[in-house]
Image: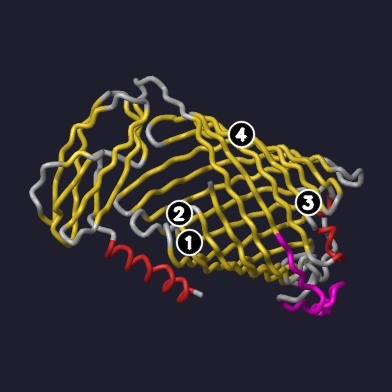
Amino acid sequence: MLVVLGLSGIVPPLMAQEEAGPQILTSDLALENDVTADSMVANFVLISNSQITAVTINGEPQQIIPGDTVLITKELRFTKQQTLVTVVATDKEGRKRERSYLVRFKGAPVEEKLTYVVSVKGAYETDGNPTNDLSSPISIKGVDIKGVVKDSEQPDTRITLQASGAVTQGKWTGFVGALQQNYGKADNKGLNTQILYFGGSGRFNLGGTRDFLIAYAFTDLNLGSNDYAQMHTISPAFETRSEDNKGFYKHQFGLDYTSKNFASATQTDGGQYALRWNYNSLNAARKNNYESTIGYGTSTEGIKEQDYSYLGANQDWINRWDSGFRFDIGFGLEYRNFPDDKQPLSKDTPLGATRVDTLWRLSFGVGMQINPKWSVMYNYRYLTDISNKAPYVRPISGLAVDGVF
């Protein structure tokens, strides 16, 4: 697995780097900036393995002495609430590199434009074990694990359709979306899922590259043709961003609190929470995106024996290339403790005398990025639960099409 990851993550980016053109460096500007003065002096250093012949800043040609290293000092003036500073460098081989820096001038009148985005997704997949029927990823001493559904009858096909939209004006964003997932077999129609969600968020700058975020989401969940639960989630978070000559980095520390209201009288309404740390890094030249989420929290389905606390981590490497072949890979691990379920299959395991689940995920995708907005991917996920109560193995694979407008 490590060898595949190394080859897939290194070879294409090195090729892209050779063709990307001059490096553009500055310690005076970050990806996003907040200033209170209407002007500033910024210094740029441009480096290439070939002679740099031309540089423009916001389309204005700069006077330079051609060479493999070029120094530019530029006074920038800000008359609008937001200014995009774009630097383009060209070398003797005709290769170009472009970098942009967003500058927010707090002393200028606020210009809040209304923007929107719509995203759609369709997937056709084979689910190897949709009911999470008992199977044996590991052996449990003294226990013969047998599920309800024969292994040969477990696989089923499913179709997933999802659409969502978001509208942003200034620091406020509103969103709405829906998901429909249907299985092929009549025996699994109770697993058919319908989700409707909407909400909004606000972003408030705390100075520099630090923001406070607050979000609310309402989710209505149906299973089969029946109502299952309605959820209200409030998510405050603190975010920091940084940049260097290699790429862009973002840390977000958040709390998600969810109130669940169940449709069935046999389930008890309740709340759950999650503490999370999201880390995101994007290599500016290679457009390799690394995403990491570490979380601790609780979950409830309204039945005391099924309530659990968890600690988990997910790591994903995703290519953000504008076009061409794509290869993505991911890994996840989650530990769940069910303190009120004291009847495991066996107490003679390292997992203890109450129910414990350890869920593992290995995923990869191969496909084409048709253009910056559309992609077609074949995705494979291998899911397994090493548990002393409900162990299972579940492979899911299929074709997915994603697009934005």
Q: Which residue is mark 3?
A: 307
State the separation of the CA atoms marked 4 and 3: 29 Å
Q: Which residue is mark 2?
A: 372
**Residue 381 falls in image quadrant:** bottom right
Disc 2 marks a residue whose amino acid type is Pro
Where 229 sits versus 182, above or below? above
**Residue 123 falls in image quadrant:** bottom right
Q: Is residue 190 left or right of residue 325?
A: right
Between circles 4 and 3, the one closer to the viewer is: 4
Between circles 2 and 4, the one closer to the viewer is: 2
Disc 4 marks a residue whose amino acid type is Gly
Between circles 1 and 3, the one closer to the viewer is: 1
Judging from the image, what secondary structure is the residue with disc 1 in?
strand
Crowding at dot 2, Cα within 10 Å, few <14 / some 14-19 / many 20+, comes out as few
Where 14 sits versus 169, above or below? below
State the image coordinates of residue 131 (x, y, percent, origin top left): 80, 65
Q: Which residue is mark 1?
A: 369
Q: Answer yes or no: do the residues labelled 2 and 1 have beta carbons within 8 Å?
A: yes
Crowding at dot 1, Cα within 10 Å, few <14 / some 14-19 / many 20+, comes out as many
Name the foreground residue: 339 vs 317.
317
Residue 386, visible in the rendered structure: no
Judging from the image, what secondary structure is the residue with disc 4 in?
strand
State the separation of the CA atoms marked 1 and 3: 41 Å
State the separation of the CA atoms marked 4 and 1: 30 Å
First reached walking from the N terminus: tag 3 or tag 2:
3
State the separation of the CA atoms marked 2 and 1: 7 Å
Disc 3 marks a residue whose amino acid type is Asp
Picture residue at 9% right of the left edge, 52% below the top: 66
Range of residues picked out in magenta: 138-159
Q: Which residue is mark 4?
A: 200
